[in-house]
Amino acid sequence: MAKTKTSPGVPNKGLYSRASYLYQAAGYLASRATLETSQSTSAKTLKNLSRQTLSDMRAVCLKAQIRQSPLLKRDVCKSCHTFLIEGQTCLSVVENKSKDGLKPWADVLVVRCTTCAFTRRYPVSTSRQKRKQLRQKPPPRQ
């Protein structure tokens, strides 16, 4: 009797779980830092621990070549690795720089980190394009 083939599962499952744990720990530390008074040393320590944890998570993902989800990337400042919490560590504004704001499809969400003043711009009304591997190839023209 031959063995039945099993599904291979997720490769590098341990690395995915480690990155997920680091992300959750950074979120917890960042939320605890906002509860503390901003002048206390424990709040600064918690903020720095959160930033270090997110930096470690990013290093794990880069080393193992793990693709992070876009939603996860939006929660982390690309410049200083701060966990972005609306109203506390970042400010969000919807801009429309078209002439007199007449083009509704030109809305852009601007997220500004209050720690390092780094800004990121995300289109609001458009959907993300699929990765090249997942896109359908158009039929060749004759």
Image (cartoon, grey):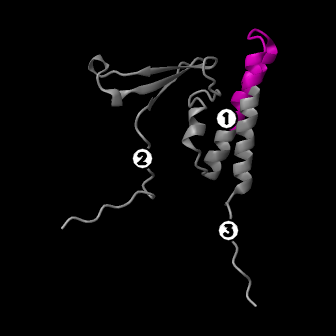
Pinpoint residue 80: horizontal percent, then vertical percent.
61, 26
Q: Residue 90's image quarter?
A: top right
Judged from the image, the secondary structure of the residue bearing numbered disc 3 is loop
* Up/down of 101 relative to 69, above or below: above
- Give the mark, 1 or 2, whose residue is nearer the N terminus: 1
Q: Nearer the viewer, mark 1 or mark 2?
A: 2
Q: CA distance from mark 1 to mark 3?
A: 30 Å
For residue 125, side relative to residue 81 (left or right): left
Asked whether disc 3 touches disc 2, contact meaning CB atoms under 8 Å apart, the reply is no
Q: Helix or strand or loop: what does disc 1 sit on?
A: helix
Distance Cα–Cα, label 3 vs label 2: 28 Å
Q: Is residue 46 above or below residue 136?
A: above
- Specify the farthest residue to the bottom: 1
Q: CA distance from mark 1 to mark 2?
A: 27 Å
Position of the C terminus, as image quadrant, is bottom left
Q: Amino acid at mark 3?
A: Pro
Magenta-highlighted residues? 30-56
Q: Is residue 4 above or below residue 91?
A: below
At 73% from the left and 39% from the top, the residue drawn is 22
Which circle marks residue 39 in the picture? none
**Residue 110: image location, x then y, percent:** 47, 24
